[in-house]
Image (cartoon, helix red, strand yellow):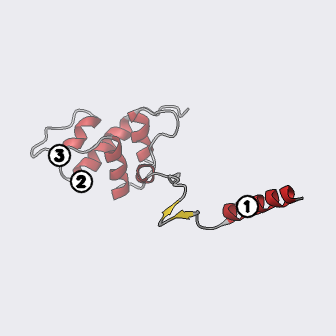
Amino acid sequence: MRMILAVAAVLYSTSAFAQADKPPMVGDKPLVQVKPKGTKEAAANPAAAKGKPQSIAVRLQACLEIDDGTKDRLNCYDAVIPPAPKPKPAKAKGYADCRFFKEEDERLTCFNGFAESIPKLPKN
């Protein structure tokens, strides 16, 4: 009988911990630390690959789904190809050259031109 009561007490306390809003604490730190599911990079870059890696072309085309002329679209492009501004960049010959433009409007226009000219690739 004592064994049954001991098992019941352990199960009851375990279920109480599992249903608590806050995790069990040890001092001022949680007993178990879990990383949140969404990362900062994924929130800033909707073109980020989930699971299977995507090509740069697919990620640039995904940025086109964001409203044009917005900082969010430029942030999406910058996440794919980080900016490296130069004082006097040459005319862009490819999408990778867009990162050299210092002015955000010029960089956005450059990326838009190349992203729109990439042939549509099938999404897997």
Dot 1 or dot 3, earlier in sequence = 1
The C terminus - image quarter? top right
Viewer-nearest of labels 3 and 2? 3
Q: Which element type, helix, strand or loop, lies under badge 1?
A: helix
Q: Amino acid at mark 3?
A: Pro
At x 50%, y 52%, the residue is: 35
Q: CA distance from mark 1 to mark 3?
A: 56 Å
Mark closest to the chain's N terminus, 2 or 1:
1
Give the spatial CA distance, label 3 vs label 2: 10 Å
User: In the image, 42: left or right of 14?
Assistant: left
* Residue 85, numbered circle: 3
Name the residue nearer the viewer: 118 or 101: 101
Residue type, numbered disc 2: Glu
Callout in the foreground (2, 1)? 1
The amino acid marked with disc number 1 is: Ser
For the N terminus, give its image quadrant.
bottom right
Q: Residue at x 67, y 63 (%)?
A: 17
Contact, mark 2 vs mark 1 (Cβ under 8 Å): no
Picture residue at 42% right of the left edge, 39% below the top? 59
* Mark 1 lies on residue: 15
Q: Residue 104, which numbered label?
A: 2
